[in-house]
Amino acid sequence: MTSVTAGGPTGRTTTVTAFAPATVSNVACGFDVLGFALHEPGDEVTARIIPAGVQIESISGDNGRIPREAARNTAGVAVLALLAKLGHRGGVALSIRKGLPLSSGLGGSAASAAAAVVAVDALLGSSAPVETLIACALEGERLGAGSAHADNIAPAICGGFVLVRRASPPDVVRLPVPRGLTAVVVHPEIEIETARARALLGDTVALADAVKQWANLGALIHGLHTSDFALIGRSLEDTIAEPKRAPLLPGFAMIKRAAAEAGALGCSLSGSGPSLFALCSSAAIARRVAEAMTSAVRTQIGGEPQTYVSEVAPRGARVLSTCGS
Ligand code: HSE
């Protein structure tokens, strides 16, 4: 790994803004190992050179709830890890624009960490390998969720549909996406903290549940490779996390049923919830499923849910703009 000087190799780049998208993790049968990127929403991070340290200059869109101290902020911790890895002696100031709601199950902490490392990598001109960016962003996830799972970080950085064979050091497999496959994500107006949702799971799983889960995971991946929508639909079952977390979401079974009746291949929690996702075989079916799920969430949970219909986004975190002096 090369050491770099402030301002990058040319000494001219002073500010970089990067975007990282929302992600759906677990994808039913892939607890902690499967995830895919959406086109939107997402978080933006602007990084600029300062003499030393990592400072969080501003955060918008969080109602003042996210820590401003770099060592307690997911983006700050990710950048501290990247600067240490690069052996960079100068500092970086970060401005964070949260497009993702907090504790939503849409990979918000991962998006901030991913956008931050991509912005700083470009700012310093370091062109770090993607595995380094994932490893550093993972430190933010460790802080935010109390666990270094990469099923949001990896798709937030790589885009697409990915399998995390191993989180650390990262070994990420990019999966094919069948033409037409479309995701619906509905975010109810409630919050579930990932750390709390993980605490519900305990440390052991019953062998019979594990057997079903890895059979479904293998079958889902085969379905993605062969564009077998029926097999994808049969495989979208979670025997590990969903049964323990579903009680956190009022009317979960009814919302799932609404998705199935409208033609979804399958529906489960997005990450640790409260958002729910469904996968559909076409954009037209996805629009019907979105209406049905949104209506069911309004009835079962109340409030005004936010609904997104998106193909799996092929691109993950990326630079939006670069300014120089
Ligand atoms: N795989 C994680 C979980 C995703 O389900 O706890 C949430 O960050």
Image (tube, helix red, strand yellow):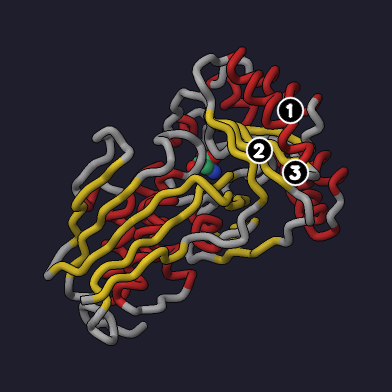
Q: Earlier in the sequence, mark 1 or mark 2?
A: 2
Residues at discs 1 and 3 in contact (Cβ within 8 Å): no
Q: Which numbered disc flags the more N-terminal residue, 2 or 3?
A: 2
- The structure residue drawn at horizontal position 33% and vertical position 39%, both measured from the top left corner, is 61
Residue 131 position within the rendered picture, expressed as x and y whole percent measured from the top left: 48, 69
**Mark closer to the observer (1, 3):** 3
Q: Is residue 205 visible from the viewing direction of this image?
A: no
Percent across and percent down for residue 87 are 25, 77
Callout 3 amino acid: Ala
Is residue 17 depicted above or below 234 in this figure? below
Q: Nearer the viewer, residue 296 or 245?
A: 296
Under circle 2, the secondary element is: strand
Which amino acid type is marked by label 2?
Val
Front position among marks 2 and 3 = 3
**Disc 3 target residue:** 283
Mark 1 is surrounded, within 10 Å at the Cα level, by few (under 14), some (14 to 19) or many (20 or more) other residues, namely many
Determine contact: label 1, label 2, CB under 8 Å: yes
Left or right relative to 89: residue 1 = right
Relative image position of residue 140 (x, y in whole percent): 36, 52
What residue lies at 81% left-to-right and 32% top-to-bottom?
263
Whole-percent x and y of residue 225?
80, 60
- In the displayed structure, would residue 90 be above or below residue 177? below
Q: Which residue is mark 1?
A: 259
Give the residue at mark 2.
Answer: 184
Whether 246 is drawn above or below 99: the answer is: above
Disc 1 C-beta below 8 A from ligand 1? no
**Residue found 41% across the figure and 78% down from its top:** 127
